[in-house]
Amino acid sequence: QVQLVESGGGLVQAGGSLRLSCSASGRSFSSFAMGWFRQAPGKERAFVAAIGWSGGSTAYADSVKGRFTISRDNAKNTVYLQTSSLKPEDTAVYYCAARGAYEGTTTYTRALQYTYWGQGTQVTVSS
């Protein structure tokens, strides 16, 4: 089992930034591919960013490319999502997800590909 706990969400003005963190406990974090998803009210959960367990491969949704950066610190069992130039349409609950992966460079962009999920952290961007 892997337990994931997100933090760092909050209320921010448009153009601002937040750094979301996801701390993992349980099985070996360093062998898990990680992802961030978000869900706005009335919408389906959507892919935001992903990173392979080696940390060298990343993937982003087109809507956040150039504004968000995913990273990980395997020594701290933590994955981060640095957000910047936030827009009101970025308002959502942000979820961290994890799954085992054989290849360290593989990233996963679909929610169904992930095994473990956190409880989410709310990000609200005001205009």
Image: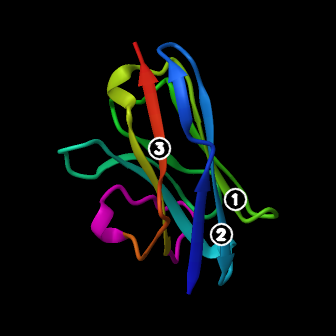
Amino acid under label 3?
A: Gln
Q: In this figure, which residue is indicated by the disc labeled 2? A: 24
Amino acid under label 1?
A: Thr
Which is more foreground, mark 1 or mark 3? 3
What residue lies at 31% left-to-right and 62% top-to-bottom? 111
What residue lies at 61% left-to-right and 64% top-to-bottom? 53
What residue lies at 65% left-to-right and 84% top-to-bottom? 27
Q: In this figure, which residue is indicated by the disc labeled 3? A: 122
Asked whether disc 3 touches disc 2, contact meaning CB atoms under 8 Å apart, the reply is no
Q: Which label number is shown at residue 78?
A: 1
Identify the image quadrant of the C terminus. top left
Q: Is residue 56 magenta?
A: no
Q: Is residue 104 magenta?
A: yes
Identify the element where label 3 is drawn: strand
Percent x, y for residue 65?
A: 43, 29
> Magenta region: which residues?
100-113
What residue lies at 36% left-to-right and 21% top-to-bottom? 88
Crowding near pointer 3: few (<14 within 10 Å), some, many (20+)? many
Occupied quadrant, residue 104? bottom right
Q: Note whether 26 is above or below 60 in the view shown.
A: below
